[in-house]
Image (cartoon, rainbow, N blue to C red):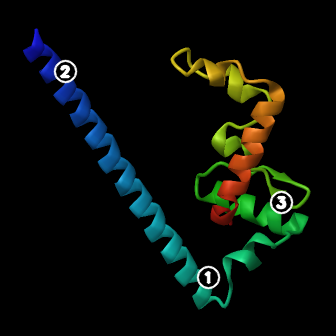
Amino acid sequence: MAETNDRDTEAYLARIRRTIAESNRLVEQAGLRMAETDRLLESQGLTREQVMGFRFTAAQREAVNEELRHRGLEPLAWDDGSLDVSRFGGWEAGSARSSLPASQPPSLQDSSDSELAERQRKFGLMMKPFQI
């Protein structure tokens, strides 16, 4: 019986190690993409902060969506000149809690709307440097 527990433990630890390795690889890829984006922006004489401050006209937004359609991609949803990113993360108000699978911890399943809104706000602030 102890041998079975040791094998189960080793298999569990192996899955954890694979998860950590995959996470590290994804973090490295994100870092490389950010560095490449910074190099591209620098070659254009721009910074991330400047790009985050861009406001687009209706004609510019339509031109972007037309180009995306031309490339076979889904058009972007714009709201008052800024990009609506809610569809990318599934963070629409009220939907995140109800879409949690039953395997999620009860603390996430039973969160109040104000707690959910606070989590969404913090997540948005955390992701702000990565938005273009």
Dividing the picture into quadrants, the one containing residue 43 is bottom right
Check the image and report above or below for 47 versus 76. below
The residue at 30%/37% (across/down) is 16
Q: Amino acid at mark 2?
A: Asp
Front residue of this view, candidates 127 and 55: 127
Q: Residue under circle 1?
A: 41
- The location of residue 95, given as percent across then percent down, is 74, 27
- Res. 123 visible in picture: yes
Q: Is residue 67 left or right of residue 29?
A: right
* Count of residue discs: 3
The mark found on residue 8 in the picture is 2
The residue at 41%/54% (across/down) is 26
Q: Residue under circle 3?
A: 82
Check the image and report above or below for 1 versus 61. above
Seen as rendered, the residue at the extreme front is: 2
How many residues crowd around disc 3 within 10 Å: few (fewer than 14), some, or many (20 or more)?
some
- The location of residue 58, given as percent across then percent down, is 89, 64
Seen as rendered, the residue at the extreme left is: 3
Please tell me whether mark 2 sits on a helix, a strand or a loop: helix
Q: Is residue 103 left or right of residue 119?
A: left
Query: Sequence order check: which comes first, mark 1 or mark 2?
Result: 2
